Image: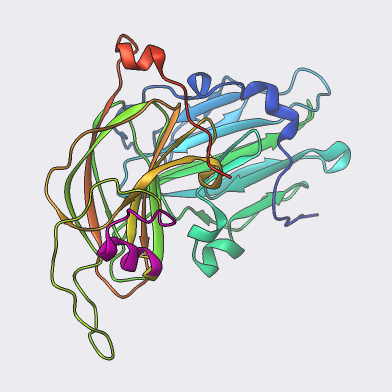
Amino acid sequence: MRAFMVKYFLIAAAASCFTTSNAIAPSLGLVRRQDVAFAEPIEILECIDFKSLDGLYTPLPATSESNTACGLYIVGDLTTRIKVEFVDFSVDCDGGHVVGVLDGWEQGGSTFPPMEDLTAEGTRNRHSTFCGRTRPRRTFYSSGNFALIQYKLAPSDGFTVRVTFEDNLTPCNGVALGDEGQFELRNFGRRSNCSVMIIHPQQLQISYMNVGKQRIRLTGLRALRPQRSQIFAKAPDSTSTDDDCTHLIKLKDYTEVLGGLTWSVGQMHSYGHVCGIQEMSSPQNNFCETTVVRLVSSGLYNNVVAVEHGKVSAEDPQYRKSVCPARAA
């Protein structure tokens, strides 16, 4: 088998399929599991498709020679991760035909989660591409509850993958299912950045937060007394930011709410930084197409934030007047 391991799969040829997030944001329910050991493969009927079920998946044969790149977006509950195994595989390497598996989601060149939010192992294994006539033996595991299978096939090509959702005891990055609900972000005492993305304008409310207060170790560090946070404080370069929160931002311990028209966190508008101890914040509206809640942790504290979210109504007068702000340069 000729196998190509590359950093990114060129899916720009399918950019026309990713015009707006409305076109790629179906309402998905809870994951339902089924016995896939002897199940018949489920045909992938659309070039861009979403699945949230255990099962065997195979694309329909290409109707003609085409440079169209397609994608199967897989997403489960926030406390799961995804296992992908190739069952059958035959993809001619000529003409750029290839199948790729990505730990994350990508559209129009923007990727979630950002590379810097992955572990060293996750960075090395983030993306793999394959072609040839021999079935890839490698089993792929996502770090979060979402993954993407990208492919560009000739009429004679085909493959089948087995998708299984497994429990994830230390979830970090995720995509939230549905228009409303609640979720929790934790760093589990690690130096890590964890984010949850929701592909809708959202109203967010922090129901509980303890960020930068519960130290993992005190040696050589001064313990800070718990203080109530300044909810959605201004960015760290602002002189009016709460002093205690500024200190924690420098240590890289804070929660951030972002919104944008992209899936790239670095290109989103930040509504500010949150830190300290808080119960039930005031609601925060994000009128952008994509909403992200991000927990940044230095590894010095056990951090946790619980968030409730609901979809912003298109009938809301503020929604009709709203413009998604651009990220400050």
| For residue 136, side relative to residue 29 (left or right) | right
Residue 13 pos. (x, y %): 75, 30
Q: Which residues are magenta?
A: 236-250
Confirm whether the magenta stretch covers residue 178: no
Q: What residue lies at 53% left-to-right and 34% top-to-bottom?
A: 326
In this view of the protein, which residue sits in the foreground, 14 or 288?
288
Q: Toward which corner of the image does residue 109 lie, by quadrant?
A: top right
Q: What residue lies at 24% left-to-right and 43% top-to-bottom?
A: 183
Mark count: 0
Quadrant in which the N terminus is drawn? bottom right
Check the image and report above or below for 262 versus 196.
above
Residue 270 pos. (x, y %): 43, 43
Residue 269 pos. (x, y %): 47, 39
Q: What residue lies at 26% left-to-right and 71% top-to-bottom?
A: 301
The colour scheme used to paint the residues is rainbow
Identity of the residue furthest to the front in this view: 239
Quadrant in which the C terminus is drawn? top right
Q: Toward which corner of the image does residue 48 lie, by quadrant?
A: top right
Confirm whether the magenta stretch covers residue 245: yes
Residue 37 pos. (x, y %): 42, 42
